[in-house]
Image (spheres, coloured by chain):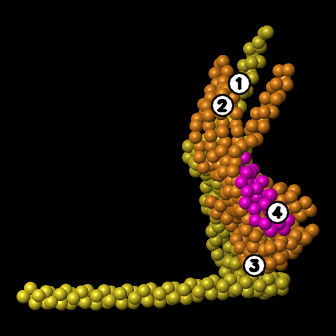
Amino acid sequence: MILKTYIKLCALVAALILTGCTTINVDQVRLRESITLEQNDAIVVLGRHQTAEIQTEASLVSCIGGRLSRGTGSTRIIPEREFVDLMYPWFEARTAPLSPKKLKAVLDRPLLAQRVRDLSIRYFVWVEGSTERTGAAGSLTCSIGPGGGGCFGFGTWEDTSDYETTIWDLETFTEVGRISTEAVGTSYMPAFVLPIPLLAQVQGDSCRGMGRQLVKFFSDEPTALKTAN
Amino acid sequence: MQINIKQLSNKLALVTTILFLSGCATNVVVKGTIPEPLIDKLPLTASLSYTEDFTNYTYVEAQKSRRSVVSKFDFKDAQISMFDRVFDALLTVAPTGAGDTDLIIEPQVLDFQYSTPNETQTTQYEVWLKYRLQIMDGDRQNLADWVIKGYGKTPTAMLQSTSAAFNAAANVAMRDVGAQLAIRFGRQTSVQALVAEKGSFPASTDSSADQKIGESVEQAIDEDVSVLQDLAEQGAVEQDLAEQVIAEQDIVQNVEEVVDEAQQVLEQAEEVIQVPSEE
């Protein structure tokens, strides 16, 4: 009986940890009416790292790639690390092309053109942005002594993530669309002996929103989408 | 329940030792390789000359306050591997000491710096590398002296040790140096001159690719020039408009002066009319 109650309590705490309060906005700009994606075409999802300030998290890029892969079914998504290694040194932070025109100049080199043909890459998806802590309040104190230990207090913090995705078509070397997401989430940590984290998964929600919208973009649904969760 | 004092004290000593060691400084040994560069081979032979200082280079932290975090940074193997890999792809590398090569390349570590998240109040581990590359001909006459800087950073992550974080940041910095070497080495004036002496590039498609790159660069320059011309024209139009406005302001000012004069004349006329009526 006690064990069942304990398991239920653990499950409740786990559920609380996984929930959070996040508001997300997704915007899309489609620069071409229809997007062609053949069966063998591949898409590369890359993060922007060109300056010390602009360093998109690798975990988010990987998350978006995973969502796109699951949502588009048969389309092959090439992971960032694999692509950057295969095309070294042309897509490092310092050397990655910043515009479709410069990408064309790079891919005019026969070795790179052949590599891109071998990989059947059709679209580049560039992700740029970051998640930052924009506020914090409260305090938490933990102590341990001979009789035992625990934490007391209450803490709260706010995270904001702002990401923009640019999609380039390698057939025409033009930009075909942009998707931006902005998410704000507040996390809470009440503590009475044990701290109970109620975390807002801001970056995860951004990935979900961006991934969902990218899938719709490549599925050729021309309606613009703006949602708040 | 009997407590074995000796066993308990041994366990306590072990726990204390582990806790003590976890607070000690880290010796970072950088491991990792860079990928095979996707570049055209230049028609030149070279030998890589690694001095003893270069092959044994280890950064030792001199500041006491920083020694508690990192005491040593050993990346000699990683940097040798990086230079070997890049130059193997760029040139035909002869064994060290082999005579009669077109180039002798001697790298040297000029500077190494790092920062921890605590120092910068960020969530990043950062590494900066600075190399000097001496490029000499077969007779060890200096052709070029090239300074290359590399930068790498990695964010903090749960359960990631300081050593692993610095390893990742150093690898990114190495890749940065390797990328610059691979792309810009062939553009060095002295290297281009040697290649020209030797003859053409091995693959004719390379020259057509270079021609296409040149054409697209020219196209980009033409577009930039036309944008600048548009801006200049717009500037000229705006200047004309400004001059027009100034001219109109002058006209308005002249009209105002005329109106003032007219008012004065009117007032004088009123005075003249009033005087005969008083009389």
Q: Say which residue appears at 58% left-offset and 40% top-offset.
A: A137
Give the image location of residue A10, x and y in percent. Answer: 79, 31
Q: Is residue B250 left or right of residue A3?
A: left
Q: Chain of mark 2?
A: A
**Pointer 1: what residue?**
B13
Chain A shade in the render: orange
Q: Observer-nearest residue: A120 or B145?
A: A120
Q: Earlier in the sequence, mark 2 or mark 3?
A: 3
Chain B shade in the render: yellow
Measured Cα–Cα span from mark 4 to mark 2? 42 Å
Q: Amino acid at mark 1?
A: Ala
Q: Chain of mark 3?
A: A
Mark 4 neighbour density, 10 Å: few (under 14) some (14–19) many (20 or more): some
Q: Earlier in the sequence, mark 4 or mark 2?
A: 2
Give the image location of residue B66, x and y in percent. Answer: 58, 45
Quarter-of-image position of residue A190:
top right
In the displayed structure, B140 sits above or below B24; it is below
In the displayed structure, B146 sits above or below B27; it is below
Q: Amino acid at mark 3?
A: Ala
- Which of discs 4 and 1 lies nearer the camera? The answer is 4
**Pointer 3: what residue?**
A105
**Pointer 4: what residue?**
A216
Measured Cα–Cα span from mark 1 to mark 2? 33 Å
In the displayed structure, A132 sits above or below B234; it is above
A67 in the magenta segment: no
Q: Tell me, yes or no, whether dots 4 and 2 are on the same chain.
A: yes
Measured Cα–Cα span from mark 2 to mark 3? 57 Å
- Which of discs 1 and 2 lies nearer the camera? The answer is 2
Q: Tell me, yes or no, whether dots 1 and 2 are on the same chain.
A: no
Q: Amino acid at mark 4?
A: Lys
Q: Chain of mark 4?
A: A
**Pointer 2: what residue?**
A191
